[in-house]
Amino acid sequence: MLGLVVARDSLPIGYDILEGHTRVPTLQRLQEKYGFEQSIVIADAAMLSKTNLKELTAAQYSYFVAARIRNDSKEIQGKFLEKT
């Protein structure tokens, strides 16, 4: 898995090759390596587990995690797919 570190202005400043699912110790190592205080984690659906989200929350990380809408109920799918 590739971890990309991007500055506020969207310019990439570094990357790391990660083994397995990204966990808080890996994120903390990246923070130390690149010297930033605050971060927002953007992850794909592979990170979407209760354990991962609890760990991110407990470590006070802000995050966006992609989800597969096909796994949701038809009602929820309809809300995402409504034409406006």
Image (spheres, rainbow, N blue to C red):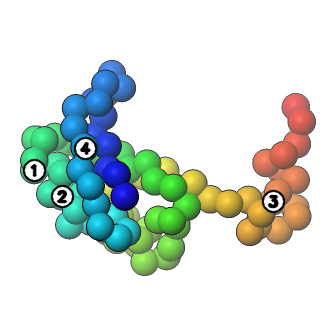
Mark 4 vs mark 3, CA separation in Å = 35 Å
Quadrant placement of the C terminus: top right
Q: Is residue 69 depicted above or below 9 in this figure?
A: below
Q: Residue 77 or 20: which is nearer the viewer?
A: 20
Mark 2 vs mark 1, CA separation in Å = 6 Å
Task: For mark 2, give the secondary structure.
Answer: helix
Q: Which badge, 4 or 2, comes first in the chain's sequence?
A: 4
Q: Are marks 2 and 1 in contact (CB under 8 Å)?
A: yes
Give the quadrant of residue 60.
bottom left
Mark 4 vs mark 2, CA separation in Å = 14 Å
- Drawn side of residue 69 relative to residue 50, left or right: right
Which kind of residue does numbered mark 3 sit on?
Ile
Q: Residue 60 or 19: which is nearer the viewer?
A: 19
Mark 3 vs mark 1, CA separation in Å = 39 Å
Task: For mark 1, give the secondary structure.
Answer: helix
Can the viewer see residue 54 in this picture? Answer: yes
Residue designated by label 1: 32
Q: Residue at x 28, y 60 (%)?
A: 18
Q: Is residue 61 depicted above or below 34 in this figure?
A: below
Give the quadrant of residue 54.
bottom left
Q: Residue at x 41, y 71 (%)?
A: 52
- The numbered dot on residue 15 is 4
Please name which of the two marks, 3 or 1, marks the residue nearer to the observer. Answer: 1
Can the viewer see residue 59 in this picture? Answer: no
Which kind of residue does numbered mark 4 sit on?
Tyr
Please name which of the two marks, 2 or 3, marks the residue nearer to the observer. Answer: 2
Residue designated by label 3: 76
Q: Residue at x 17, y 43 (%)?
A: 37
